[in-house]
Structures are given as C-alpha cells and as structure tokens.
Image (cartoon, rainbow, N blue to C red):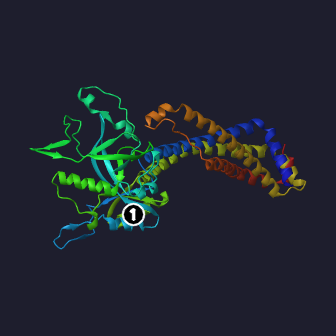
Amino acid sequence: MNSSDLIRMGIKNLWRRKLRTFLTVLGVIIGTASIVVMLSLGFGMQEAYTGQIAQMGSLTTINVHKNYDDFNQSSPGGRPKTVELDDKAVAEFKQIPGVVAATPIVQAYGTIINGRYISETPIKGIDPEAMELFEFNVKEGRLLQPGDDLVVVFGGSMEYQFYDYKAMQRGRWVEPKVDLMKDRMTFTFDTSYGYGRMDMGHQEGDKKIKYKEYKIKTAGVLQEGDWDTDWGIYAPLETVEKMIKDKQKAENQRPEPGRSTGTNYEHVMVKVGDMKNVQSIQDTLKSMGFQAYSLNEWIEQTKKTAGIMQAVLGGIGAVSLLVAAIGITNTMVMSIYERTKEIGVMKVIGASLKDIKRLFLFESAIIGLLGGIIGVIFSEILSLLINKFGGNFLDFLALGEGTKISIIPIWLIFAAMGFTTLIGIISGYYPAKRAMNLSALEAIRTE
C-alpha cells in the first residue's frame, strides 16, 4: 500500500464516521484552546509587567553604590574600610567584558527659576560622552557634549513641574506657560525660594546663606516615558561638581576631596550591551566589593512568577487535552470493532502489518492535527476578545491601557499543532497495535 492509497483510505474512513470524528476532534479543539489561551495569559502578564518595569529605567543599566555593610578588609585599629567608588573604580568598570559605558552620577537638589515660575528639582551631573551610550533620547534639541558649561538637558516631564509661586501664595493655581528650549532660566541651591523668601537667601539660625545663581542654557529635552529620566535636569559632571563646591562653601561645609585627589562617588551607572549579561556583570561588581542592583532583578522575579502562573494555567488546560487523548483512543478502538472484517480482508489480500499500523496511526494523527489547527484558530479568536473586552481586568491588575492580557507567540502556535498531532499518534498506538494482532481468518468470520 503506497502513501497516496493510505491517505485516501484514512480520510475515507474518518469521513464515513463523521459524527464520531467530529466529536473526537471537538475534544482536541477544546483541549488545545484551553492550553494555548491559558499559556497566553501567562505570556501577557509577563510582557505587561516587563513593560511597566522598563518604564522605570533601562533594563541594561546597573546602579553601583558603595558597600557599607560588607567590608573587604579591616584597618589595623579594627575600623572597617570600604572599597572606594572613585575614578579608578569607574575605569575598572569600563574594562569588564560586556560593559559599554560607565559614568559617575553626582546629584544635588535646587530650584529652577523661570520668570514667575519655579520648579524644585534635582540636578544630576553626568559624563556628556556617556549620554548617547546610555541611550538617552531627546524629544527636542540635543544631548550634552564635551565642553558644555552650565548647559542642561531637561527630563521629559519637567515642563509639568513648574508653577507660579506668587499665585500659589495667594492660594490659587495658574497653568504655567513654559518653553524649556527658549526661556531664560536660573538655577540656585536655595530650596526655600517660593516659600515666602524672595531674596535668594536661606535662613539657618541667625545666619542667612547666600547661594549663587547660575544662568543655565537648555541643550535639549528628553523623551517622556522613562520614570528614571523624566524628572530632573542633567548637566556635565564637572559643572555640577563645581556648583556643589560653591554650595558647600556658602554653607561653610568642609568640601569633599576634588577629582584631582580621587573623588569618592556615591553612585555610578554601568551600561551593559546585552540584557543577557546584566546578571553576570552585576555579580562581578558585587564580588569587587560594591553594592549593585538593576531592574533585571525585578524582571527575573517576574519571570518566575509568570512561570508558576503558566504551569498552573497550563496544567488546567492539559486536563482537557488528556480527556481529548482518551477520546481519540476510544474512537480508534471502536473503529477496530466496527472494521474487524475489513482488517481481515486487508490482511488476506496482502496488506502488511506495517500498512495496517500506518493506517490507524495516520487516522489518529489527522484527528490530532485537525483538532490542533482549529483549536489554535479558536484560541486566536478568544485572545482577541480577551484583549478587546478585558479592560476591567487590566484595571484590577493596575496595568496600563493598551496592554495585551493575552499574547500568543508564533512558536506556541506551531508547538500546539505539533503537540496535538503527537498526542493523536500516541493515542492511536494501542488501537493500531491491536489491529495488527487480529487473526485474519477470525476477522473475516466476524459479522
């Protein structure tokens, strides 16, 4: 029996028992749709939470701080000694395989004055050459460049942070009209500005502190959507360090060691080229004696949670497919009883045991494949409906609008069809073996 005869006979046999074939295929459809939709919910949750985490900052950025808890060594007097987070350490970070860039972040808080509008904001010092490598994207203007002085880049949402301080003192709100690119602005470390003191001074006891005013120029405005960069302004590292020294001098504070003597930083950002390497590089930084964390830790936790959810949901769907597999076996066994004489005739006219086995396995595989294909189509329809009408569920999970609850990857479609076909073949193996073992003479005598 050649392949074309086998296919023709197998399809003919299934068609003769249309109702039974339909009911068996229906069981596979329900089982396939159950598993695919359940798994798609897990993928959707994982994608949604990953997107939320990505809004908090870059997934390939590692934040490094001094490690005050775990000391590498102790001084002779028993006093703990930390590993310094200085320029030498930053240079070592850049040499780690997989690291694209590293930059110190120096931060202080102050006030931006834009005519009648003000905004309390952090000013962050960063290496201008590193901004592009850290994938800062501008909505307007440009990023910082080497040689910039008193030039800033505004966070994407900073235009919403200004307010009319005089109107606020009178108890009313006035919508600010601010053009970040064109307006003339001044920065000061006086955080009391706008709270009843209009003389650029800050009172500490009987002494008034006079802070410097810095006329700043805007280089660009970053794109919105990243919680890590939306708030605050960025300026060249050296500029912010000089401003902080001026602030310390005004407050009669003892200045920290300058860069010439090796500045000790509180925070360094490390950019990794591939997200797959984030965890290993983070572990390397910790082994060097520093504290290191990244959003990748949250991603890993999300993956574990999604994996557990998918296992539970997939297990529920698998029960339906198990029932469908039993249905396939039952259909094929019943087919043997109905076709006993036919099987006997096939053996008498020369059909080999292998041909009979192939015929039954083909029929069961067709049931599995057909159920898988229709089940996947049904799953896609269900997925579209879930995504369209699942708004209340999104609100319950605190997920943003436009987020998909159900996501069906391409590989899952092909995997589902392949799996159901395999289930069909496995379910048909016992009936096929039973058909092979039938005695030809007894089968012919059977009515």
Q: At x 55% / y 40%, what residue is drawn?
A: 406
Q: Is residue 228 left or right of residue 333?
A: left
Q: Quadrant of the C terminus?
A: top right
Total numbered labels: 1
Q: At x 84% / y 54%, what residue is drawn?
A: 3
Q: Quadrant of the N terminus?
A: bottom right
Q: Is residue 170 left or right of residue 374?
A: left
Instruction: In this rendered view, identify the residue nearer to me: 347 or 72.
Output: 72
- Where disc 1 sits, the SS reads helix
Instruction: In this rendered view, identify the residue nearer to me: 8 or 18.
Output: 8
Instruction: In this rendered view, identify the residue nearer to me: 265 or 63.
Output: 265
Classed neighbour count for the residue bearing mark 1: other residues with Cα under 10 Å, few (<14), some (14–19), many (≥20): some
Residue 287 image offset from top left, x and y in percent: 35, 67
Up the image or down, 3 lies above or below 157; here it is below
Q: Amino acid at mark 1?
A: Asp
Residue 429 image offset from top left, x and y in percent: 71, 53
Residue 226 image offset from top left, x and y in percent: 43, 45
Q: Is residue 193 left or right of residue 53?
A: left
Where is residue 388, by image quadrant?
Answer: top right
- Farthest residue to the left: give it: 206
- Farthest residue to the bottom: give it: 76
Up the image or down, 339 lies above or below 75; here it is above
Up the image or down, 392 lies above or below 283; here it is above
Where is residue 266, by image quadrant?
Answer: bottom left
Residue 47 visible: yes
Residue matched to label 1: 283
Residue 437 visible: no
Residue 303 image offset from top left, x and y in percent: 47, 51
